[in-house]
Amino acid sequence: MMLRRILIANRGEIALRVMRTCERLGIETVLAASDADLNSVPARRADRVIRLGPAAAAASYLSVDAVVGAARAAGADALHPGYGFLSENAELARACAAAGIIFIGPTPDQLLAVGDKLRARSHAIAAGLTVAPGGDVSNHEDAVKLAAQVGYPVLIKAVGGGGGRGMKRVAEPGGLSEALDLAISEAAAAFGDPRIYLERYVAAGRHVEVQILGDGHQVVHLGTRDCSIQRRYQKLIEEAPAPQLPEDVRVRMHEAAVSFGRHLSYRGLGTVELLYDVERENFYFLEMNARIQVEHPVTEAICGLDLVEQQIRVAEGRPLSFTQAEVHLTGHAIECRINAEDWSRDFRPSPGRVTRAIFAVGEGIRVDTHIESGADVPPYYDSLMAKVIARGSDRSQALGRLCGALERSQICGVTSTLQLQAALLRSPGFVAGGPTTDYFRTFLDSHQAAGHAG
Amino acid sequence: MAAVELIDVSIRDGNQSLWGAVGLDTARILSIAPVLDRVGFRALDYTSSTHMGVAVRHHAEDPWERIRLTRDAMPNTPLQFIGTGLRFISWELASPEFMQLVYDRLVANGISRFVVLEPMHDMHALLESARMIRRAGGTEIIAALTFTLSAVHDDEFYAALAERLSKSPNIDRLYIKDPSGLLTSERARVLIPAIRARIGSMALELHSHCTIGLSAQSYMVAAELGVSVLQTALGPLANGGSLPDAERVVANLRELGHTVDVDDRLLAASARYFALMARAESLPFGVPQDFDAAYLRHQLAGGVLTTTRRQLAELGLEHRFADVLREVVRVRAELGYPIMVTPFPQMVCSQALFNILSSDRYANVSDQIIRYALGKFGRPSAPIDAAVLKRILDRGRADEIRREPGPPDLDEQRRQFKPGISDEEFMLRATMPAQLVDAMVARGPAVRRYNPATRPILKLLSALREQEVKDLVVEKPGFRLALHRQVS
């Protein structure tokens, strides 16, 4: 099946990113846009635009009916869900299949297998991966026992959550009961699924993930990414490959991710997220993201593949055209996300009109953005404005280029994290490489103490 | 009204006819391949032994890698190889075992459609090539009916030839190959029905160059008379010495009530890509050609004509140009009407020049003419004039050439190169100077991305890097770019 017309059921930079590949491949793009995005840059770039619904995501980007209806109306062969929104929604994948539209992503069963975090955990165990000590809890008694077993602090996670959402850290036994009640009610409200589970909290941990690609038969990995610079589990800076990692650990991570993919006969792009325990030099399976990631450009920079193209090829039913031995990872790449947020006010979103947007270009620099002077950042969706990616032959060259690029970039009209990111990239802990997930908090405290303001 | 399919020749014949076969490299092909795949072409005229040689010689790129990558980038459209079946890359004749290896590896690397071509229309050679290609796994083998104007090449000649070819199990389709663009609408009206009547349901295609502007119309006649596939080119790679422009042909066919199932948006996008590339790389655009009545007589394409004129000028004999052209017509007849495609125009022209320069015709003959007279190029369509044949072969050099050893044995050839190299590399080493293949190997994998839109800026940047520039100002309405050197 050769794809000729793809509906893009997403917005912002990822919508543009998918369009760029489609244009290169000669595939017509139809953008499904909410009322808030009808005048966006992606809407102007798409071959066609179809109105998806009102601005509120629940009635547009999160509505399976609206999205499938748009794909039908557009006469699309396939649907690209991007990331976020319905990208890992098995119901959407099924509805597409029922409508004769190819869902560019894994099978519904695979989405279910990894969407339910507890089920993903058991698949990981079955595939021979190590998971963090812990497990599911059905009542308070179980929880108390399990927490005592794995040792405090513990993390309470929502089974239906993911991407850092719906997690609570409990430091001592005294706080467990209250945190459990809160977590259950929040999980029920946020994910429609009250189930929770418990895991050991790794104090000195790094978030390292492995990109995999499968065609339903063959699975290859495309190296590691380090995404330890996070604020409340939201990634701020990502790099590939993960720096300061013992080589044998890296190899074991690659193998673990491929085993997991093979276990699922995985189809499409996926990311196996691992928690690297720096002290024990060990890693645990966290979860799998069954979609393209925000941070995919750093992997593209080191492996030379267009990952959206690979998704499309797999969706067309073509086998992978290369083997693991033909994957060559060279150089280093770092990406930083520029959000419309005011960090000095607890990262409050700062929607509005961008009056001036300048993104630096130059050797080794790539900018994925849907923002230009005059563009709007609507208040309804996440605040990502741009991703600035720098590639170099090694980490220090990539970092130097990224710092230079941020210095030459400018965003006016909305408050952005541009300056904060520039400072973060220059901070000694980041420059040294391999900081743990608590690094950003430490950095922010000292940055504030030094008298910086938004 | 007919349903007509298109074959795009931009990458092979367009590139060869207009850009000397050097205008496209791997990156430039790969960057448009996925789009070409979705246009809906029946196949692409993709490569030839000449193009494969140019990849190594001119771009230091591996032509086999190029085939594999293109196949991967456009899996749905068959890729065609065109060759004479006698030689590969070098001008030396190759052994049948060597040619079998060529075909085996072409199929393995991603070629599925093959043209079998023999300008002399030597049936035996043609069918032998087809048999080898079939054995290699070629799925579509198309035989060329090479068109020319001569005393022997009448409608019956082509109809009989077509009939015989159509009976071979190793020939799947036929095409009228008009390399010199000589087919008028009037001739098409009688030639095509004559051929069609003798080949049953076998598909017939038309490939006619725009050399004197005849093909735009003969294509429309062909569609009407049962030619189901027309071979065309895109944007700047159409017209001139190349084939008709695909967009124009589609528009004309539809105007006349025929249907063409191609994606118009992508057809335009492909043409635009080549146009942007031609501009960015200063490659010439094919332009529609004027009718030239004299050309129908001498059939010498522009390149050969220019070379001949230059050679005469260098000898101070420019005023003899008309005499040379007359002599060309005479020599061609005496040699049994070789079809005026490479290498024959060059051979006939230089013989005509020799004959004009000397008081004694055929006193001087080239080794190539001797080989031709000895039948080393195959059997001519009509016998060579007996007196001329005797004159050519009645010299010591002819005996030497007669005693030249045949093509080397495949095993013997292999032993000349270090063991362990791939068949693909062996075939390049066996047919090209070692240093060229070494340079290709040293270069490593080919660049895969090309964007004509960024080329001017990249050129500017690399020039700025190489050159001492203090100030640079670019101004156009509504735009001013000023760079000033800062002393740091």
Image (cartoon, coloured by chain):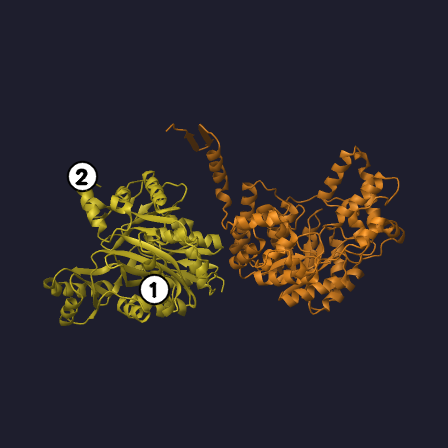
Chain colours: A yellow, B orange
User: Is residue A41 shown to the viewer in this render?
Assistant: yes
- Outermost residue on the right side: it is B387
Q: Is residue A420 above or below residue A314?
A: above
Chain for mark 2? A
Answer with the quarter of the image where residue A217 lies: bottom left
First-in-chain label (1 vs 2)? 1
Horizontal and vertical percent position of residue A134: 21, 67
Give me the disc on residue B22. none
Residue B439 falls left or right of residue A94 = right
Mark 1 to mark 2 CA distance (whole Å): 44 Å
- Which is in the foreground here, disc 1 or disc 2? 1
Amino acid identity at mark 2? Gly
Residue under the image location 51 percent in, 52 percent down: B445
Give me the disc on residue A256. 1
Chain for mark 1? A
Residue under the image location 62 percent in, 63 percent down: B104
Residue A415 falls left or right of residue B298 = left
Q: Is residue A98 above or below residue A236?
A: below
| Towards the viewer: A236 or B144 | A236
| Towards the viewer: B254 or A290 | A290
* Quadrant that contains the N terminus of chain B: bottom right
Residue A19 falls left or right of residue B152 = left
Pointer 2 local density, CA inside 10 Å: few below 14, some 14–19, many at least 20: few
User: Which residue position holds label 2?
Assistant: A451
Horizontal and vertical percent position of residue B209: 69, 50
Amino acid identity at mark 1? Ala
